[in-house]
Amino acid sequence: MTSRPGLEPRWAWPSLICLWLGACAGAPAGPARSLHGDQAAATAQLQALIRQEMRSADIAGLSIAVVEDQSVLWAHGEGWADRAGGQAAAPDTRYRMGSISKLLTATAAVRLAQERRLDLDAPVSAILPELAMRDRFAHGGPVGFSLRQLLSHHAGLPRDLPDGMWGRPGETHRELVGRLASVELAYPPGQVFHYSNLGPSLVGVAIERASGLPFDAYLRRSVLEPLGMVGARFSAAPDPHAPAARPYHGLQEGTEPVLRDVPAGGLEASVLDMSRFLSAVFDPRGGVLDPTWAAQMLSAQNEGVVFDFDLKVGLGWMLAAGDPGVPREAGPVIGHDGATVHYRSRLLALPRHRLGVIVASNSDTAGPSVDRIAEAALALFLEARTGLRPRAAVPSPVLAEGWGEAAWARWCGDYTTAAGHVRVIRSGHRLVARIADMEVELIPSREGFAIPRRRLFGIFTLPKDDFGGLRLERRAVSGRELLLAHQGDRTLLMGERLSPSIGETGPRPSPGLYRTIADEAQAVPRASVRITEARGLWLAETSDPEAPDEIVDVTVLRPVGPLRAERLGVLASGGEVVRWDPSGRALDFAGIPMERVE
């Protein structure tokens, strides 16, 4: 979930992209001495980090629990659940968990599959015959994606249907089945990972159909109560009468709007509730799933998907989630993060050591801090319990003679990436990548990679590595010129180089400035998008609703038919569809109605 559905900068792609944009700082360096056997020292260091992050980011309240197998090693609350009411944040404070909800929704679907009441591999249209969505990649035939593809974000669905997602009381996830008749797929099912909140919402309807119960009632009966998550519930909005954390914009109290897509982001729970869920993941015996089905949830569902590389996804779970600073020998890290309009959360776990952490906050400014705290907690407690410590990254040796002529031709050009449009140019003897209003120099390494270094004022290249050892590679795969990102031993798809003629054919979009059509019933910011042409490319420049002059995202539009274009992502074809009317005065920007204002 997100506070700006469909319009947020796509910086929440796996952590390599976050590092590419310099948005992640990683866990703090540990002390010189080992923390092995000294949980008190690990706790003290973590508490100091929490207080530092809360001060620097204006965070109202935060709760954390660290779990080992069936026990809570440490649980703590800091700040306020309700500043005006004087209620301190505590381990049993309830927060909106955002997309961590998907883990519980997936668990419920798998339980029904275990009971042979749902078939994870059947076309969803067999379960929901009224689903009239068509597949534009299959000549307009009916969509054929399965529940398994929905749960692993490989159905090709758009990320969101923003219109009605927030702040429209009475609209529920059930209405999505009918509304998707006018929505187009972003990618062919099974082609590439594409995160979507629509998928789990459709799964929620399938759960209702198979169980005969409303979604929230079935989740309570089949998952929450059996796991002892007594304070947890699924709902469209916080209960104002419950002892839950109030929502804050920084330190200013706000109002959390009603959410339509409850199966994707409507869980309200405490970190102690989530610790019980983690314990069931570590040892499913006596829980809601048989061990074989529980293991399937943590098994990669996208083996063989060429463009996913080392991005692995289970049923609901992100496998090898991020790079939280734990040593390789600790085993894979699994997890999920969450965000609503005001709340932020992060869950991480090391199944090999049965160690996990859950962090939640009630401030919309807390996202990066929650990530850093969760990653630090996992690394610190792993060291305290096992003695395992992260190794310092070994920098790639720089190629002293610089780039050669062949490299200029190979690297220079326009790219569509998870971070938006990137242009790589030659600047004297340097290679420079421009991302929105930021410049990064690409320095050649002896292994053939490009090493990013931040540039100031377009003049000075900083010697410091702000990107966590990130290395970039150009590689031809399946006829595409891909941009890959490496960190440690992980490789992820970052984007694809564009053909110079990509925007020269087909109907031309209507350039100009478009703004979200006002709807007082919805909590959708008045965002702006400028459609412009540059060097034969059609670009969509998205501005920050709170700072209209600040461009936060630039994406490439690829015309695909009359009055339609794809908003490109990591590949040079496919993407969420943008549509405009013949007059050029109105625009449907990937599900967001907009009007031209200049």
Image: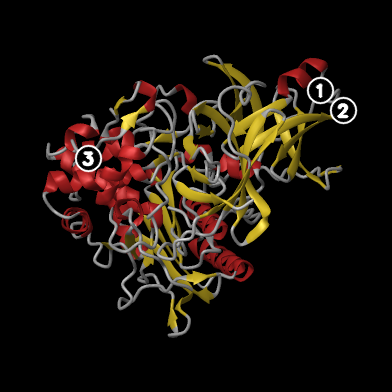
Q: Nearer the viewer, mark 1 or mark 3?
A: 1
Crowd band around label 1 with a 10 angstrom C-alpha radius: few (<14), some (14–19), many (20+) = some
- From the viewer's perspective, tell me whether residue 178 is left or right of residue 562: left
In the displayed structure, 420 sits above or below 374; it is: above
Q: Position of residue 26 (x, y in %)?
A: 60, 50
Who comes first in sequence, dot 3 or dot 2? 3
Indicate the amino acid at tag 1: Trp
Q: Residue at image x 30%, y 78%?
A: 241
Query: Label 1 belongs to which residue?
Result: 403
Indicate the amino acid at tag 3: Pro
Identify which residue, 517 or 119, lies in the foreground.
517
Q: Residue at image x 32%, y 41%?
A: 180
Who comes first in sequence, dot 2 or dot 1? 1
User: Which label number is shown at residue 429?
Assistant: 2
Q: How far separated are the C-alphas under marks 3 and 2?
A: 58 Å
Query: Label 3 belongs to which residue?
Result: 291
Q: Residue 505 sits in which quadrant?
A: top right
Q: How far separated are the C-alphas under marks 1 and 3?
A: 53 Å
